[in-house]
Image (cartoon, rainbow, N blue to C red):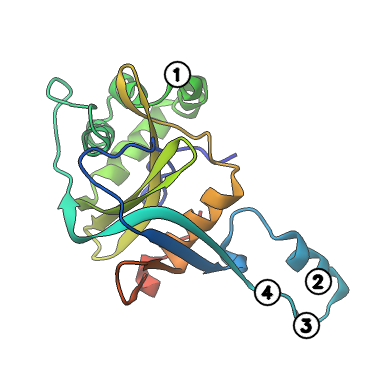
Amino acid sequence: MRITILLICAILICCSSVFGEDSINGNLTFKVNKKFLWMPDEEIIEENKKEVILKKEKFAEVTLPGKLYDLPKEIKDTTKKKADKSTPEGLVASYFSANKVGDFKWILSNFHDDDKEEITKTFSSEKALEITKNAAKTITAIHLTGFANYKDYTLLFVKQNFKQGNNITEALACKKTENGWKLTNSLSDDKTFDIVFAAIRDGKVLDSTKTKATILKPEARFIR
């Protein structure tokens, strides 16, 4: 199971199907080579065992309602007192800011109740918290580049720029509760989310309202 934790190159999160003032008038198609999927494709595994040339479809594809922003939305740092989780953007700002100061209780408050036990185990040592804090401090800028709706979740596309000069874009996710938006790992073993996550990172995304697909550069890739 994948755990949401900021370790310089990976965050995995999830969000609800109502997305503030943003309206959806199109679909997003995510396409990626199956070798980049977190969950191995059964057909490819079987073919490899037989040591034959793959003749079946090598790409995974899924289409969901969503949009890519013409101008990415900047996510700015906030404080624990001023954190506003009434929107997905506010939740992302709260989460990243909490990581930067290494405040465990603040980090935990950004997660859905169903995830808190696992997150608590993840940060059971001071070392894990320190690693997360140091990694978060290497991020120089964060932007939302788009979103997609899936089931009761909204998948956010978050681009992170690092001091080293590289950047990554990942699918984050959250769910709306009575206490605002909360991060969750409930899609960590979901095949559709796996395709979205991999396509954002190593494949391409086509917005039905635009003419060109968004393709990530090689330097944006990393190993989960």
Label 1 near label 4: C-beta < 8 Å? no
Numbered circle sitting on residue 57: 4
What residue type is disc 2 on?
Answer: Glu
Q: CA distance from mark 3 to mark 4?
A: 12 Å
Q: Residue at x 50, y 37 (%)?
A: 3
Q: Quadrant of residue 104?
A: top left
Q: How many C-alpha atoms fall within 10 Å of the one at disc 4: few (<14), some, or many (≥20)?
A: few
Circle nearer the N terminus (4, 1): 4
Looking at the image, residue 197 sits to the left or right of residue 191; the answer is left
26 in relation to 84, above or below: below
Residue position marked by numbered label 3 in the rendering: 53
User: In terms of sequence position, does the residue under pointer 3 or pointer 1 come before the other?
Assistant: 3
Q: Earlier in the sequence, mark 4 or mark 2?
A: 2
Secondary element at image label 3 = loop
Percent x, y of residue 35: 61, 67
In the rendered image, the vertical position of residue 103 relative to residue 202, given as above or below: above
Task: Return the residue at label 1.
Answer: 113
Cα–Cα span, label 4 and label 2: 12 Å
Identified at 28% across, 30% down, the residue is 102
Quadrant in which the N terminus is drawn = top right
Q: Residues within 10 Å of mark 2 (few under 14, many from 20)?
A: some
Q: Residue 47 shows which numbered tag? A: 2
Q: Are marks 3 and 2 in contact (CB under 8 Å)?
A: no
Hey, which quadrant is residue 61 in on the image?
A: bottom right
